[in-house]
Image: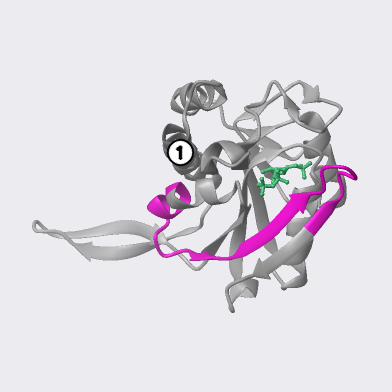
Amino acid sequence: MINVKLIEHPLVQHKISLLRDVNTGAKEFRELASETAMLMCYEATRDLPLKTVEVETPIGSAKSKVISGRKIAFVPILRAGLGMLDGALALVPAAKVGHIGLYRDAETKNVVDYYCKLPFDVAEREVIVLDIMLATGGSACRAIDLVKKAGVKMIKYMCIIAVPEGISAINETHPDVPVYCAAIDEKLNSEAFIVPGLGDAGDRMFGTK
Ligand code: PRP
């Protein structure tokens, strides 16, 4: 069974159209990536467990619900995943943050990891890995490997645009990790770029290249 959750909320879909647009500049791109991540995070945290507490209102006592137990860490994949971090933290301000640095070698297409720093108590947390694009899935699978090696038991992967190849790669390598995405595009081109996609998210966000 395919472990993917497609977030089709109209506000998310509208923002993705603006992210895709070649005329969207770096400042607007960063704002849109963050806003999209915030809305997606709302869906990705839908299963957080609740417990009932007693709250004193100005009128009386109410049985009400608060999030119970499970703590979250966000782990953006550098660089593009950084664009989703502010939005995710806006929704879960108490979350801790880890960073994983990966890039795809332009010629070999192999994933090279150059940085991994995770919260000291990450093994006790649910981790949501963040990246804007899921192409071959090489970066996502490596990032999930690194998070699992740190002892994390509950992991979700959240990206804005995916292709079927990338989803299959995660599903096959890490069947326990659900993939949250907001668009599933047609295919990869010969350079492993998503078609139609939105271009190179890192470059568009930071003005490189
Ligand atoms: C891009 C993108 C993802 C990765 C997806 O990053 O931001 O991290 O490629 O590709 P994959 O699924 O085939 O691994 P890139 O390697 O360009 O690095 P950058 O974010 O530093 O620009």
Residue 121 visible in image: yes
Q: Is residue 37 magenta?
A: no
**Pick the front one: 125 or 1:** 125
Q: Where is 20 relative to 88, above or below?
A: above
Disc 1 on helix, strand or loop? helix
Q: Label 1: few (<14), some or many (≥20) within 10 Å?
A: some
Q: Please count the marks in the image.
A: 1
Q: Where is 136 relative to 148, above or below?
A: above
Q: Where is 153 relative to 202, above or below?
A: below
Query: Which of the image's four quarters has the C terminus?
Result: top right
Q: Position of residue 154 (x, y in %)?
A: 67, 61
27 left or right of 103 in image: left
**Pick the front one: 206 or 126:** 206
Q: Position of residue 50 (x, y in %)?
A: 45, 58
Residue at the spot 79% in from the left edge and 30% down from the top edge: 164
| Residue 11, quarter of the rendered image | top left
Please, which residue is most extreme toward the right here? Answer: 108
Disc 1 residue type?
Leu
Residue at the spot 52% in from the left edge and 46% down from the top edge: 83
Q: Position of residue 69 (x, y in %)?
A: 50, 68
- Residue at numbered disc 1: 39
Range of residues picked out in magenta: 87-112
**Pick the front one: 131 or 52:** 131
Name the quarter showing ligand 1: top right
129 left or right of 104 in image: left
